[in-house]
Image: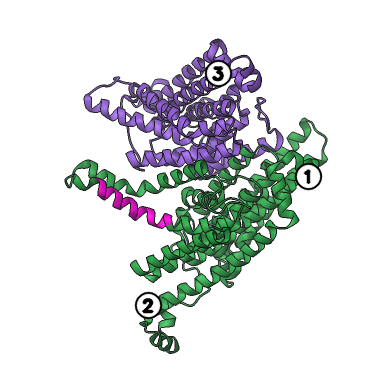
Chain colours: A purple, B green
Amino acid sequence: MDFLNAFVALANYVLVPGIAYGSQLALGALGVTLVYGILRFSNFAHGDTMALGAMSAVLITWGFQSLGLGLGVLPTALLALPFAIVITIGLLLGTDRVVYRFYREKKAKPVIFVIVSLGVTFIYNGITRFIIGSDDQNFLDGERFIISARTFKSMTGLDEGLAIKTTQGLTVITAIIVVAVLFWFLNKTRSGKSMRAYSDNEDLALLSGINPERVVMITWIIVACLATTAGVLYGLDKSYKPFTYFQLLLPIFAAAIVGGLGNPVGAIAGGFVIAFSEVTITYAWKKVLGYVMPAGMEPDSLVQLLSTDYKFAVSFVILLIVLLFKPTGLFKGQSV
Amino acid sequence: MNETLRNTGLFVIIAALIILTGFQQSWNAALLIISMGLISSIMALGVNLQWGFAGLFNVGIMGFVALGGLAAVLVGMPPTEGAWTAGGWGILGALAFGAGTIFAATLVMKRMAKGWLRTVVVLVVLVAGFFIFRAVLDPSVAAVEAINPAGTGYLGGLGLPVILAWPVGGLLAAGAAWMIGKTALGLRSDYLAIATLGIAEIIIAILKNEDWLSRGVKNVIGIPRPVPYEINLQNDPLFVERAAQFGFNPVEASTLWVKVLYVALFASVLLILLWLSQRALNSPWGRMLRAIRDNEVAAEAMGKDVTARHLQVFILGSAICGVAGAMMTTLDSQLTPGSYQPLRFTFLVWVMVIVGGSGNNYGAVLGGFLMWYLWVMVEPMGLWLMNLITYGMSDGYWLKDHLIESAAHMRLMTMGAVLLLVLRFSPRGLIPEK
């Protein structure tokens, strides 16, 4: 019974939040890694693309809510998501046209692209704050829990409860669907194959008649889908606040680098590595250990390795370790 | 038009703008713009060293500036009564032990043969070390933070003259830069950017959360000054008499005089650093750095150690930012960890360097003054613009309220737009590299 309680406590505080957070990071890291693979620069504007995409979803959700449209138990934001994606696609394609294309034609160094993307970051961030302000925004509705801690306790008779929020379930399911569609697209369709070819060897791809501008356009469209979805899921699960997305940049990049920049499978693995390290290191283990340890040896302190304020430090340390020992990442990414 | 004339003209325009502020608003405001302009120029010099000379992309300027601010507290503030005996030594011991653990782990990595045994030993050393570290650290921290939490609750500083904090701030920043440079330099250029982004966030998190060190979000106020206090000047009969001779009343004269002293201090630091940077730029070392920047492979083929030079210049540039950070905290007389924003301390400095002219020290100084001036002016201008746009709308109309409220966010967009426009249409900046 004690072990069961320990497991449920672990699942409730570590596994379920970790999986949800990991899926959100994985979706973010996929976007970063795709831009890196095709356009060959680290896109610092990705966090704020997520913020802008999520903002469009928040505004559309409010519109639907005032019209009385909804999905019943599911959040209305899901209904708004496709529209938000369309807005984000327009935004990214417009940015590419106005900003990035010039440097692509000039064959500028990658570091120039990074600086430019930093400029884009601040413009996006400014637009977001200009429209929606910098405060917390709530756009979650529908059923809050798939299973609440109290129901779980009365169902199983255990002391520990297991709560699964709707948003957490939704995050995981959406992430699985998005990733499945993405991999089908990359591996089976003609456009996907041309993208991979372009990423592997640009010159050969150009020789075989692949249109680079088309590849870039498709990349931005996919990145818009991924960023908006990740942004909306993160906003639903935590809460929507524009500046948190800039701070997400570090774990997202860490995830992409841990997995190997430019490698989609690596990005997903990296997302979960970062998420679970962050959650396990900042979780107070007192409760779980209290069940598992023999009587009399229960810990007195919280057994929290690091306070939650330092969760960035976790991604950062993992990033440093990977850079020191395996700069191409766990799953062979692109050039060092 | 000859080049020197043109560059002098640019500086004269900035001076005229600031003097205009002095006539229109007040001389106090103008002097404040000059002091912050001087500090901004020093930061820009540091970043120019990294980016302009060596092509290194550092997105963590905020962190190095904040470390300089911490130095001002650690050097300038008086030590807290009883804190050292209560837990100060325990904290120092724990930190030394932590450093020893990492050192031991690297020693094991180097000495033992590769294999699973090495991995296990390293992990055991690290995990055991971490728990002992926490066991020593936590009670000491609690003891220090328990001492008069509303007033102090931290270790305090050394009680030395605060000017000494400026070089110390440089040293702290250099230490952090060494750590980052060691790991991220020599890899792809993007990795340095991401690593510096991370270290900046972590340094700010430490300043916000480690109350024993920096009082966290409770802020450290009243850091001693290197210049006299206004109230003392006003009580000094000699000063009052002098002020009267020039036709000032004592209060106004004292505030102006204090600011003039600050400007003089900052200007001398800027001049020294500018002179050093100019010497560096025109030395064989500077030429080597530019050679590496323009063609790494060729420079390496000529026998230049690219990674070592990059590490050197990265540390130097970050140290300069640290010095500027210490100076800024000295000017404010307070350390407020919550006020460090990437936009203000990383991005703005980048815009200064690129607008001024990357690779040119005078350009960095010009950019520092110009962008600081704009930074101060954008907000009132944004508000004015919004008032103009909403002129026709009736009061209380939601769009009008929203637009006027949002004027504060104009800075983000303006700075982003300035950067993108300059990069696109005038990538060499106002005073281009020779």
Going by the image, does A210 lie left or right of A243? right
Q: Secondary structure at mark 3?
A: loop
Q: Magenta region: which residues?
A: B374-389
Q: Main secondary structure of the magenta part?
A: helix
Query: Hey, which residue is sitting farthest left in the picture?
Result: B394
Is residue B388 magenta-colored?
Answer: yes
Q: Identify the amino acid type marked 3.
A: Asn
Q: Are marks 3 and 2 in contact (CB under 8 Å)?
A: no
- The answer to which image quadrant residue B392 occupies is top left
Q: Identify the amino acid type marked 2.
A: Glu
List x then y, in percent, for residue A263.
61, 24
Going by the image, does B334 lie left or right of A294? left
Of mark 1 and mark 2, the one earlier in the sequence is 1
Q: Using the numbered discs, state the Cα–Cα distance from disc 3 to disc 1 in whole angstroms.
A: 52 Å
Frontmost of labels 1 and 2 is 2
The answer to whether residue A329 shows anywhere in this view is yes
**Residue B107 numbered tag:** 1
Q: Secondary structure at mark 2?
A: helix
Q: Look at mark 2 in the image and give the residue it sits on.
A: B252
Q: Using the numbered discs, state the Cα–Cα distance from disc 1 to disc 2 in whole angstroms.
A: 62 Å
Q: Look at mark 3 in the image and give the residue it sits on.
A: A211
The answer to whether residue A160 shows anywhere in this view is no
Pointers 1 and 2 within a single chain: yes
Q: Using the numbered discs, state the Cα–Cα distance from disc 3 to disc 2 in whole angstroms.
A: 69 Å
Give the crowd class for mark 1: few <14, some 14-19, many >=20 residues within 10 Å: few
Q: Pointer 3 indicates a residue of which chain?
A: A
Frontmost of labels 3 and 1 is 3
Q: Pointer 1 indicates a residue of which chain?
A: B
| Image quadrant in which the N terminus of chain B is located | bottom right
How many numbered callouts?
3
Is residue A285 magenta-colored?
Answer: no
